Amino acid sequence: QLQLVESGGGLVQSGGSLRLSCAASRFTWEYYTIGWFRQAPGKEREGVSCINGDGSTYYAEDVKGRFTISRDNAKNTVYLQMNSLKPEDTAVYYCAAETRWGRVCRNYQYSGYGTWGQGTQVTVSS
């Protein structure tokens, strides 16, 4: 069974950077669409970014230009590089995998993911 493990969260000052990792336990990883989501206290979970097996990427407007999603298939890992962090980026960040053949994200709000990680906390202080 596919398992996802996020890491890389922490406490950072406004303007700082963090790189989140989402590691998977399956070797067909390179075909999967992977998404990053976040949930702030008292708010609904929201999509942040996604990356397809062909490398195409999508971002929410408020992170575009600051966050970069990428994948290293040799390491079964997807990254979310977060630069110029703001206090409003504070949230628990989750990665998720779409493992159904042919299903891809065409925008950052794609919600068909069936496997989720446990989340990693990102806190940005002002």
Image: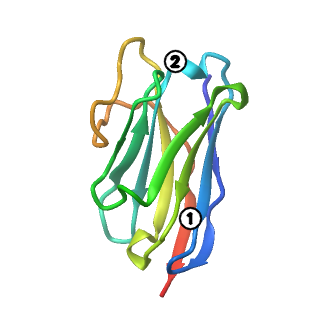
When the figure is inspected, residue 75 is found, relative to residue 102, above or below; the finding is below
- Measuring from the top left, give residue 54's x and y in whole percent: 46, 21
Of 39 and 13, the residue lying toward us:
13
Q: Amino acid at mark 1?
A: Gln
When the figure is inspected, residue 21 is found, relative to residue 30, above or below; the finding is below
Q: Amino acid at mark 2?
A: Tyr
| Element class at badge 1 | strand
Relative side of 71 to 55, left or right: right
Of 100 and 32, the residue lying toward us:
32
Residue found at the very far front of the displayed protein: 65
Of 58 and 110, the residue lying toward us:
58
- Measuring from the top left, give residue 72's x and y in whole percent: 64, 32
- Measuring from the top left, give residue 41's x and y in whole percent: 39, 71
Q: Earlier in the sequence, mark 2 or mark 1?
A: 2
Foreground: disc 2 or disc 1: 2
Indicate which disc residue 121 carries: 1
| Element class at badge 2 | helix
| Residue at x 43%, y 27% (from the top left corner) | 52
Q: Pointer 2: what residue?
A: 31
